[in-house]
Image (cartoon, rainbow, N blue to C red):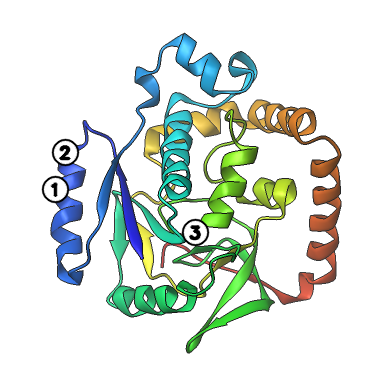
Amino acid sequence: MKIFVINLEKDTHKKEIFIKNFSKFNLEYEFIKGVHGKELNKDELNKKVYDYKNCFMTDGEIGCALSHLKIYEKMQDEDISHALILEDDAIFSDEFLEYFNKFDEFLKDKKEFDMVCFMHQNDEYFKNLTIKIDDFKIYKIAKGVGCYGYVITKNSAKKLLKINTPLILEADCWVQFIKMCDLQVYCLDKNIIKTSDFNGLNSSIGDERHKMGKQKSRARKSRLRKMGGGRYMIGSLKYRFYYKIYSKFLVSGDKHK
C-alpha cells in the first residue's frame, strides 16, 4: 500500500520528526508538498475555491483540503488502488504495522471497493454497521472530523475529487461527503494513529474555525444546496434516517486516549 505524507515545505522540523519516528516501521513512503493556503493569490483562490469571497474557509483549511485533493488526483493518474494518507504530525502506536499490513492484504484484490477508514476512533460510530478485516472490525462513522491518518481507495478518492472540485468543503467534512456522494466512511475502535495536534489541524486553523462559528455553518449549507441540489437533500434525509434508526448502537469514541 502506498503511503503519502503531507508536509508544508516550510515545516522542515516536522518533516525531520516524522522521518525519525516512522523509520522503525521500515516502510516506503512519499512526502507530498502541502499547499500553503496563505501563499495562494486571489486569482488562484477564485479559481480553486467555489465562491471564494463567501466560502468562510480559512487559508489553512483551503491549503489543507487542496493538499488532500492533490493526492486523490495522483491516485487516479497513477492507478493507485488504495493508499494511506498521513499528515506530518501523525503519531503511531506499536500496533500500527500489524494493522497496516492487514488493511493492505484486505484491499489488494478489491479494485472497485469504496472505503475511507480512519486509523483511529471517531467522535461517534455505529457498533452494528461493520466490515470484518482479518481479526478486527471497522465501524461506519456517524460523526467526526480529522484527516491526519486514514486509508482510502481509488474509488472513494475519485468521488471526493468530483464533488470537491472546485473546493466547497474542508478536507475533513466527512458527514457532508457522506450526504453528497454516499461515501463509505469507517473508523477503528482504537487509536492506531493519533496526532500531536489534538484538533487534527494546526492550532491556528482551529482558532480561526472557532471564530467563524455559525457563519461558517450557514455558508457551508448554502454551498452544498447550490452545488449538490437534490442529491444533498436526499443524502441528508438518508443520513438522518440511519442516525435515528441506529441511534441505540451509537458509540462515542475518543481520538486522544
Marks 2 and 1: in contact by CB < 8 Å? yes
Residue closest to the eye, 5 or 28: 28
The residue labelled by disc 3 is: 152
The residue labelled by disc 1 is: 16
Q: Position of residue 177 (x, y in %)?
A: 66, 47
**Would residue 144 be visible to someone looking at this image?**
yes
Q: Image quadrant for the N terminus?
A: bottom left
Q: Residue at x 35, y 77 (%)?
A: 101
Residue closest to the eye, 161 or 219: 161
Q: CA distance from mark 1 to mark 2?
A: 6 Å
The residue labelled by disc 2 is: 12
Q: Please tell me the numbered disc located at residue 224.
A: none
**Would residue 196 be visible to someone looking at this image?**
no
Residue flagged by tag 2: what amino acid is it? Thr
Residue 245 located left or right of residue 207:
right
Residue flagged by tag 3: what amino acid is it? Ile
Q: Position of residue 71 (x, y in %)?
A: 41, 45
Q: CA distance from mark 3 to mark 1?
A: 25 Å
Marks 2 and 3: in contact by CB < 8 Å? no
Mark 2 surroundings: few (<14), some (14-19) or many (≥20) residues within 10 A: few
Q: Image quadrant for the C terminus?
A: bottom left
Residue flagged by tag 1: what amino acid is it? Glu
Residue 5 located left or right of residue 147:
left
Using the image, determine if residue 17 lies above or below residue 59. Answer: below
